[in-house]
Amino acid sequence: MSDPAHEQRRQRLAGIAMMCGAVAFFAALDAIAKYLGRHMDPLQVTGMRFISGFVIAFVIFNPLTRPELLKTQRPGLQFVRGLFFVSTTIFNFLAFRHLQLDEALSIMFATPFLVAMAAGPVLGEWVGWRRWTAIAVGFLGVLVVIRPGVGGGMQWAALLSVAAAIFYAAYGIATRMVSRHDSSETTLFYGNLVGVAVMAPVLPFVWSTPSLLDLAMLVAVGALGSAGHYLLIAAHRRAPASVLSPFIYTQLIWASALGFLVFQDIPTQWTLIGGAIVVASGLYLIHRERKVTGRVVAPVEPG
C-alpha cells in the first residue's frame, strides 16, 4: 500500500503542475487575443471565445447524457456572474490593443485586493489591518505600473484594464457565492452559455470574414480558455487553494515571454517594479487569509 503522506504530496504536485499549465494556457489565450485584436474587432474575438468555448465544453461535459449539469440552484446569480465574465473579457481584449501583455496583467492582478475589499460587505468576510495594509501596498504597485500624471497623464488604455479588474473582482465574488450551491462544471458551463447569449446578437454587427489562420486562432481562444478552466477545476480537486494560488502569478512570466517573442515587447522598469509589488502584496494577502481564516482570496485567473 502506498504511504498516505506520499500520495498527498504526489497529488499536490500534480495540482501545482495543472495550475501552472492552466495559467500558461490563459497567457497564450491573451497573446492570441492581442494579435487578433490588431486587425479584428475585439468584440468579434470575444464572441468567438465564448462560442468556441461553449461548443468545446458541451462536447466534453455533454449535458445530454448528464442532465444534472444543467441544474442550478441559483440561475439568477449564474446569469449575473456570466455578465461579469463577458464584461471583463471585453475590457481585457480592448486593453490588449494598446497595452503590453505584462502591463495589462500587472493591473489585472489588483483583482484579489478588490475581492478582499468587497468580501466584507458582500460575503461577511472582513479583513484586518494587516490585510488592509497589503491591499494598500498592492494598489501602490498598480499605480507604479499606470503612473498617473507621468508622461502626459494616465494612459487611457490602462483604464480599460482597471475596468476589467473591477468586473473580474465582481465575477470572483459571484463565483464564490455560486460555488456554495452549484458544481464547478455547472458553473463553467453556464459561464460560456451566458457569454454566447450576450455576444451572439452582437457578432453580425462587428463580423469580418477571417482568414483560415485567423479562424483557427479564434477557435483556439475558446479552446485555450476551456482547457485552462478545466485544468483549474482538476487542480483544485488535487490540492487546496492555499497551495495553488501562489502559482497563478507564474502567468506574469508567460505573459512577459510571449509579449517579447510575439510582439517584441520589453517590460519597462515600471512594469517590473510595480508588478513585483503587486505580486508580493498578493502573496502576503494569501498568507494572511490562510493563517487567519483558513480560506484564500485567490489571485486573478483570467481566461
Image (spheres, rainbow, N blue to C red):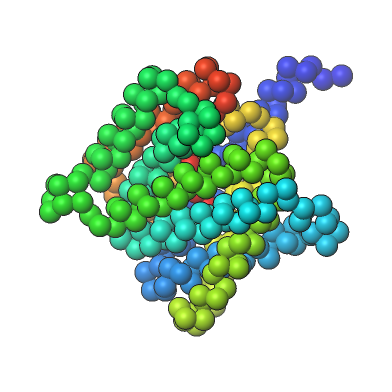
- Going 38% across and 19% down the picture, which residue do you hit? 130
The percent position of residue 60, horizontal first and vertical second, equals: 75, 57
Q: Is residue 24 visible?
A: no
Q: Is residue 37 visible?
A: yes
- Going 60% across and 67% down the picture, which residue do you hit? 196
- Going 41% across and 58% down the picture, which residue do you hit? 91
The percent position of residue 98, horizontal first and vertical second, equals: 30, 60
Q: How many marks?
A: 0
Quadrant in the picture for residue 178:
top right
Quadrant in the picture for residue 135:
top left
The percent position of residue 301, horizontal first and vertical second, equals: 51, 44
- Going 30% across and 53% down the picture, which residue do you hit? 159
The percent position of residue 48, horizontal first and vertical second, equals: 55, 69
Left or right? Give the position of 66 relative to 133.
right
Closer-to-camera residue (271/212) = 271
Image quarter (top left, top right, bottom left or bottom right) of the N terminus: top right
- Against 141, residue 9 (above or below) is above
- Against 48, residue 262 (above or below) is above
Left or right? Give the position of 248 relative to 273.
right
- Against 273, residue 21 (above or below) is below
